[in-house]
Amino acid sequence: MSQTRTMAPMFWRTLLIVTAICFLFSQQTLAAEDLQAFKPQNTDVLRMADNFFILYDPSTTMDVPYRDTGLTRLQAQKQIIRTSNGTLPDLGWQTGLYPYWKGGLWLHGSPGGFVPYYRLSRYEKQSFAEAIEQLPEIPQGPPMLQIGLMKLEHLLGIPGRTEVFLFSDGKDSTFTELEPQPMEQARKLAEQFDVCFTIISSATDEDAKALLNQIGSVNSCSQVIDFDTVYNHPEHLLGKLFMDTGSSNFNTVLFNFDRSNIRPEYLKPLNTLGRTLQKQPESYLVLSGFTDNIGTKEYNIELSKRRAERIQNYLQTNFQIDKSRLLTYWYGFADPVASNDTEAGRKLNRRVTITIRNK
């Protein structure tokens, strides 16, 4: 269960509320030119989200040895972000790199105050890499999941879909004077904004796992990924942000209307793909699910998820391919490849795209 800290002295209660308010008014509004739509130079690479944030957890509970790597989990978290950034094409996202909180107060401009490592602005690969190197490897204080989610409320609202990558072990030093609590705040954000959460979970106890799974279920585009999975495959972390359609290993599986079962004509190529993965242990798949535009956005996101997971399960079951090598993303009726105004076009949009990648 989350660790509750009751800040008994009135001084601390007041200070927390005042600094939170200061944080709100300290955020800079994006200039109009920063909100322009950026087209990728490589037309074979599609941007699948408009914005993304990474929330870094520099808490004391992350300062524990991570497996036999010689790193703490905090250091491993930084390494994941660093390596994953190296896999990103520059597709002009709006992005920000923020800690849940930073040692000291949040008073704007104070020496220990809240200063984002990459303030919300256009993504530039080298600048973002330099910001990553500033992430602390020494813990900054207790876990502050509640505070991190509260911060997001003042960062979201920019045009387009926003992906939030949130590192957490499910621990939280909750301030009882502040509402809402972590789960309620995540649900509030999902209701107010076009946002999807990808939670990188290092939770070890059942209560912590349950909390993160609940947050990962606030809407159909959110998910929980195990910390070990992204450490072993750091390219998985930000892979949801883009899709490479120019690969010679790019294939499509089509589905019947409102169905997620695999059609018989695709079993043979999937079997060939499964055998290929067995022979190439360094390869992995990106399975991206889509739908036509019949029905609600929420229903179609869930349907596209089921389609991607159906292929994932088929390859797992029949070829014993580890789940960490079968990365699933789902986008509903986003990015149609044909017009949804005709039945012929809708048939082409009911699909899972499959891309083979190498580490």
Image: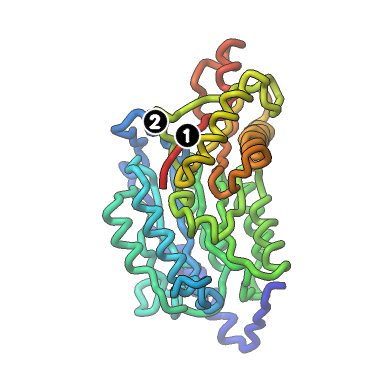
Tell me which residue sits at (47%, 41%) in the image. 280
User: Which SS class for mark 2?
Assistant: loop
Q: How crowded is the residue under tag 2: few (<14 C-alpha within 10 Å), some, or many (20+)?
A: some
Q: How crowded is the residue under tag 1: few (<14 C-alpha within 10 Å), some, or many (20+)?
A: many
Find out whether the residues at labels 1 and 2 contact each other: C-beta distance under 8 Å: yes
- Answer above or below: position of 190 versus 297: below
Tell me which residue sits at (46%, 71%) in the image. 69
Residue 3 shows which numbered tag? none
- The reply to whether residue 153 is in sight is no
Q: Position of residue 270 (x, y in %)?
A: 58, 29
Label 1 sits on what residue type? Thr
Label 2 sits on what residue type? Ser
Mark 1 or mark 2, which has the lower sequence index? Answer: 2
Q: Quadrant of residue 301?
A: top right
Q: Is residue 215 left or right of residue 106?
A: right
In the picture of the structure, the residue carrying the numbered disc 2 is 247
Residue 355 shows which numbered tag? 1
